[in-house]
Image (cartoon, helix red, strand yellow):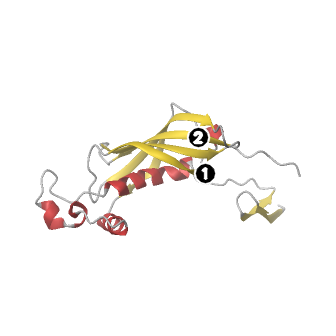
Amino acid sequence: MSMRRQVDARLGMEVVVGERRTVEQRGLWFEEFETDVLYLHRPGRTITEADNVLFTTLTMNTQALHLDAAFSDALPPFNQRLVNSMFTLSTIVGLSVAQLTQGTIVGNLGFSEIGFPAPLFHGDTLYAESEVIDKRESKSRPGEGIVTFAHTGRNQHGDVVATATRKTMVRRRPTEQPS
């Protein structure tokens, strides 16, 4: 089988080309996104105490509900530390990347309708799902489109712990350039 390496200008990296078909992990191009589809992102992510403490301290959030076990254990209604809600939000978006936007996103345009209807605790496993609620071609940027996602995070019991609407700019499928 004849194989060689060449630089892929779009990816900015060396790739193997030849007779063998290759499959690259990537997100979806604008044209591939569908409304009325529920994208389930697996596997989930079990959240540890270390995850919560690291994220909370990295972001300078000194809230005792995240860091102080004695304080939190004595405070109803949960009587335990809560996972930082921004970590929860970041993780549900992060869980979606490989399936939806890896290498195809231009950038996030904004978040809205963010909610945390139930708490997440150390030891809980977070699962994410996404739905495309809107998509349109960009009016100002040819070759790109705007995709709006409704992200939902659930714990291992199926309880919704986070929701968010995220608007993104996504690349259209590249056209083949003549050699």
Residue at 58% from the left image edge and 53% from the top image edge: 102
Q: Are marks 1 and 2 in contact (CB under 8 Å)?
A: no
Residue 65 vs residue 25, the one in the foreground: 65
Instruction: Residue 85: give x, y in percent of width and height.
Output: 32, 54
Residue at 57% from the left image edge and 49% from the top image edge: 101
Instruction: Residue 104: give x, y in percent of width and height.
Output: 62, 50
Residue 90 vs residue 5, the one in the foreground: 90
Q: What residue type is labelled 1?
A: Val
Instruction: Residue 107: give x, y in percent of width and height.
Output: 56, 51
In this rendering, would 6 be left or right of 80?
Answer: right
Name the image quarter holding the N terminus. bottom right
Residue at 12% from the left image edge and 53% from the top image edge: 76
Q: How busy is the neighbourhood of tag 2: few (under 14 within 10 Å), some, or many (20 plus)? A: many
Q: Which amino acid does label 2 sit on?
A: Ile
Q: Residue furthest right?
A: 179
Q: How busy is the neighbourhood of tag 1: few (under 14 within 10 Å), some, or many (20 plus)? A: some
- SS at mark 2 in the image: strand
Q: Mark 1 points at which residue?
A: 106
Instruction: Residue 130: give x, y in percent of width and height.
Output: 46, 41
Q: Mark 2 points at which residue?
A: 146
